[in-house]
Image: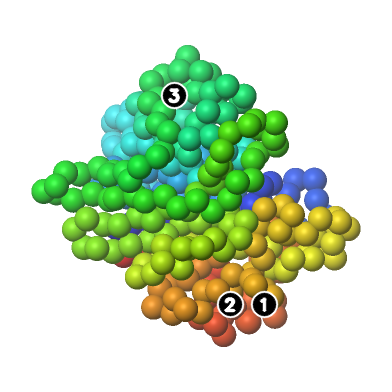
Amino acid sequence: MRLRVLGTAAGGGLPQWNCACPTCARARAAGPEAWRTQECLAVSASDDAWYLVNASPDLRVQLLAAPELAPPDGTRGTPLRGVLLTDGELDHTAGLLALREGAELDIHAPPPVWHSLGEVFPLRGLLARYGTSRWHPLDRQLRLGGSEDDGGLTVAAFPVSDKRPRYAAHVDAPGPWAVAYRFTDTRTGACAVYAPSLADWPDGFDAFLAGADCLLLDGTFWSDEELQHVAGERRTARAFGHLPIAGPDGTLRRLRPHPGARRLYTHLNNTNPLTDPDSDQHKELAAEGVEVAADGLELRL
């Protein structure tokens, strides 16, 4: 299994275009090497079949930076076969518009997200006018690429949040509105879990992570009060639907029972001190054997 981390920032990226907070100012002064595009992942089912997990507004730049996703020489084609949405947030769906010129794609989403992208924020109908996209409500285990003989990936989803995107705040539909994905290579048994949005640590989630070779989890906020200190925002990290990294109930402590996996954080907000590789928080993370994913990181499992 191969994974390419296309982007690692929360909404707006780093630096945000309209922000001069300390972390954005540092990144802006440091130049493009310190910048982060908005969160997105690509995972391979076989050499010629890749799938996106989420589609960020920065998708065009991310695809151009990933040689594996380039069209074969002399063709107008792509190894991209489909997209799996973890939720319906604009930061994870707006990039679908950048794929409108491509070939057929299978797009999978949790059922209420599938509904909302058809009835409330009508991406399904809009994209249908530009090409062929097959949309699927994700309510079962999937098999991506390959066959029983030549391999591929199986994908299982786990509910992690009922937080609705703002455009669907009025929609009366049962969750889950956000899921985590567990990818398993059918040939080797290699396994990765991707969970860029965690409102809490639900019952059964440890079992969902157990035995995985790689965990890429929600690293939006370092602390629950982070936005209060940096931006004067009254709401906490949890109020925004993200479990913080630090603290007695934070994800760093909850990752300790999984020392055998490579553990990384993604989806970092522009206020998160982990965006500075020289920060004390970065050193604290390293002492636990946990990493911060970088744009362009390739993982082979």
**Distance of label 1 from label 2 (alpha carbons):** 7 Å
The residue labelled by disc 3 is 101
**What is the quadrant of the C terminus in the image?**
bottom left
Number of callouts: 3
Q: Quadrant of residue 247?
A: bottom right
- Residue 37 visible somewhere in the drawing: no
**Place of residue 4 in the rendered image (x, y in percent of width and height, measured from the top left):** 42, 55
Foreground residue among 38 and 223? 223
Q: Is residue 89 left or right of residue 108?
A: right
Q: Residue at x 85, y 55 (%)?
A: 233
| Residues marked 1 and 2 touching at CB (< 8 Å) | yes
Q: Amino acid at mark 2?
A: Arg
- Mark closer to the chain start, 3 or 2: 3
Indicate whether 113 appears above or below 270.
Answer: above
Foreground residue among 2 and 157? 157
The residue labelled by disc 1 is 248
Q: Is residue 65 left or right of residue 76?
A: right
**Distance of label 3 from label 2 (alpha carbons):** 44 Å
Indicate whether 25 appears above or below 167.
Answer: below
- Mark closer to the chain start, 1 or 3: 3
Q: Amino acid at mark 1?
A: Pro
Q: Is residue 54 left or right of residue 155?
A: right
The residue labelled by disc 2 is 253
SS at badge 3: loop
